[in-house]
Image (spheres, rainbow, N blue to C red):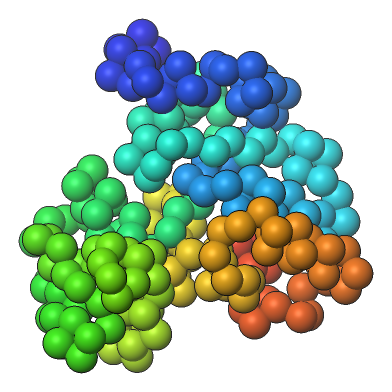
Amino acid sequence: MAAIIGDAGQQADTLFELSNSKEFLFSDRVVLVEGRTETVIFPHIYHAVNRRSLAESRVGLIKLDGSGSLKKAGDVLRAMGLEVKIIADLDYVFRTARQNGMLGVTDERFYEIRSICSRLADKGCFVLADDGFPKKSKICSAEQGFARLAQDADASAIIDTFVEDLQEMHIWIWSRGSIEDHIGIEGKSLTAQRQFVQNLQQSNDLSFLPEAASISEAVAFIDR
């Protein structure tokens, strides 16, 4: 335990902040996320599907600062005997998971995706970073670039195989890019998030969502 915390000091400090510690001290399972949207919206989605809250299911939800912290924070919580699930955006596959050794750096699928990225960049869909994947530019944000990548049929088929592999490691990937792409809201503003919650409460189910099936699968993933 001490060795794990020593290698993840910053993540441990974040976890033991009062606002986060209450999320795992009384939970059997913890879900780690990298975005504010998940912390605002996912509890309502979970309740709409299961008709019970995360707390009633003894599930904690913790937001960390960036995808790079997810694995180390997960290691700390697992050392404490907790079950951990991770929810991450699509870029996690091609950057964080690869860098952390969860996916082989020589995996041929990466070369195939880079080839598709190059083709899409040539069409002006986004600008490529030095690693061959989308980056923030005047054309779009990096997140929007990955969402555009996910819309390509050839890329989508490969992405699905990465998603399946990472689920075996207890990691859920938003295969369309981010949670916003699955629930159909623009941007990450609190106004858009609150409007979504209001729509969800009025509907009382997920039928109005463009990706209702994948959202239900995400909830089922947390409960497995």
For the question of whether residue 42 can be seen, the reply is no
Q: Position of residue 31 (x, y in %)?
A: 57, 42
Q: Is residue 24 depicted above or below 188 in this figure? A: above
Q: Quadrant of the N terminus?
A: top left
Left or right relative to 116: residue 211: right
Point 20% across, 91% down: residue: 123
Q: Which residue of the protein is positioned furthest toward the top in this rendering?
A: 2
**Residue 70 shown left or right of residue 16 in the figure:** left
- Give 181 or 141, whichever is nearer the viewer: 141
Residue in view at x 40 percent, y 50 percent: 169
| Residue occupying image coordinates x 43% and y 30% | 73
Q: Position of residue 65 (x, y in %)?
A: 43, 36
The reply to whether residue 203 is visible in this rendering is: yes
Q: How many marks?
A: 0
Q: Quadrant of residue 144?
A: bottom left
| Residue 118 lies in quadrant | bottom left
Does residue 187 sit above or below 70 in this rendering?
Answer: below
Asked whether, in this view, residue 188 is left or right of residue 75, the answer is right
Closest to the observer: 6 or 57? 6
- Residue 80 against residue 109 in the figure, above or below: above
The residue that appears at 9% across and 61% down in the rendered structure is 130
5 lies above or below 55: above
Give the x, y percent position of residue 188.
Answer: 56, 59
Q: Position of residue 140 (x, y in %)?
A: 34, 72
